[in-house]
Image: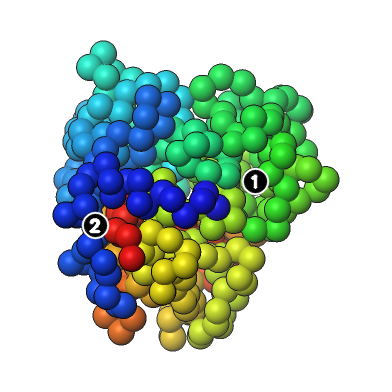
Amino acid sequence: MRPAKTASIICAAVGLAACVAAEPGDIDDDLATETQALGPASAHAFATVTANGGVVANSSFNSTGGGGTVTTPGPPGLYTVTFGGVGGHGGNVQVVATGTTNHRCQVVDWVETGLGDLAISVQCQRPDGAPEASGFVVQYARKTAAADGVGAYVSAYDPANPAYCATGDYTWNSTGGANCLRRLGVGDYRVDLDGLAAAAGTVQVTSHGATGVHCKLRSQWGPLGTQEQIRVRCFDPVGAAVDSVFSVSFSGDQEVSAYDYGGYAKAHHPTSAGYSPDARFAYNSGNADGDESCSGWLGDIDAGHFAASVGRYFLRYENLSHITATPHVTALGTDAAYCKVEDWIAWPAAGGVEVRTQCYAASGAKVDSVYVNHYVTGLVRGPC
């Protein structure tokens, strides 16, 4: 985790009037939406998009202040999300479908426009791969170690290559080490992140393309020597293993966003009505007052399975806002199951947020599954 200077520096940048002391459990009154640029090399943005191409303003964010727009070029389920002022090359994109249907979504590509904006293409499909409109969340990050702390991301752009180390603007490692990939079989990959070995943190995975392929975590990520190793599997619409381009993002221990305000958890008990996630792979910045010595720095996390529902889950983050935030989920396991975000709502009992997830077999039938959630915000709380 970065030193506990982040919030106080950001508050100074936007003015102390936006960063007042917080009372326990009081979230919305004193949270400031952060819009200053993170520097020429670093940018963050996310958008919550409805099936008809609308942007949910209070669940979207752009670190440059440039906002976000969506166009629908014409083909079913195809969207272009443009973040104003983000520009630049490279970075990492994560996408997940939202809502109560069994749709999936992929990132097609992302490019800098001539106006200094960033345009991300997203394709959504039914489980059989047929393109169709769906709501979704898209998250973009272009990181530096100074602004974003410990972590890495990489686009695995050569899916048939048995072994290579990624180069270019679409790979980043906070230690300066290499991000290397190995193909262990059809649709079966290992990602090796140099210098980041830890039994901690969280991982996001998204497939690239427009063919209905989905990718997921195969097993628990963890250290081997000095490397963090992540296993990924990819499947076609009928659930057969298939080679695919994909993106992986790894966030180190207690790294949740550029502003140290958010959470993550591995939901590892797919049939339990209620439990606390493994603390090694769960974190909630909670009532983040800008310094780890502040009261309420950490918040609780409750996880569970909704009664009388197959594959439907909740994660409840105490003292995290449900606005200016988006969740991403990734299924974990050797089968072809996938998960999506159903919705996220205020959790008044603990002044926090409840994130609801639904998991499916490749066919689109509901199924129980282990999954990983990363809850990202564009918010920061002022000094305590």
Q: How is the image coloured?
A: rainbow
In this view, the residue in front, 53 or 57, is 57
| Residue at the image point whose x is 54% and y is 58% from the top | 254
Q: Amino acid at mark 1?
A: Val
| Residue 116 place in picture, x, y as percent | 27, 19
Foreground of the two, 377 or 357? 377
Q: Badge 1 is on which residue?
A: 232
Q: Secondary structure at mark 2?
A: loop
Residue displayed at 35% across by 51% down: 8
Residue 135: image tag: none
| Quarter of the image where one finds residue 321 | bottom left
Q: Which residue is mark 2?
A: 19
Amino acid carrying mark 2 in the image: Cys
Q: Sequence order check: which comes first, mark 1 or mark 2? A: 2
Question: x%, y% of residue 133?
Answer: 27, 45
Q: Nearer the viewer, residue 359 or 228?
A: 228
Left or right side of 30 for 302: right
- Give the crowd class for mark 2: few <14, some 14-19, many >=20 residues within 10 Å: many
> Which percent across, then down, holds residue 266?
56, 65
Examine the image and state in which quarter residue 315 appears: bottom left
Residue 337 or residue 372, whichever sits in front:
372
| Rendered-image quadrant of the C terminus | bottom left
Q: Is residue 195 left or right of residue 101?
A: right
Residue that appears at 31% across and 77% down? 24
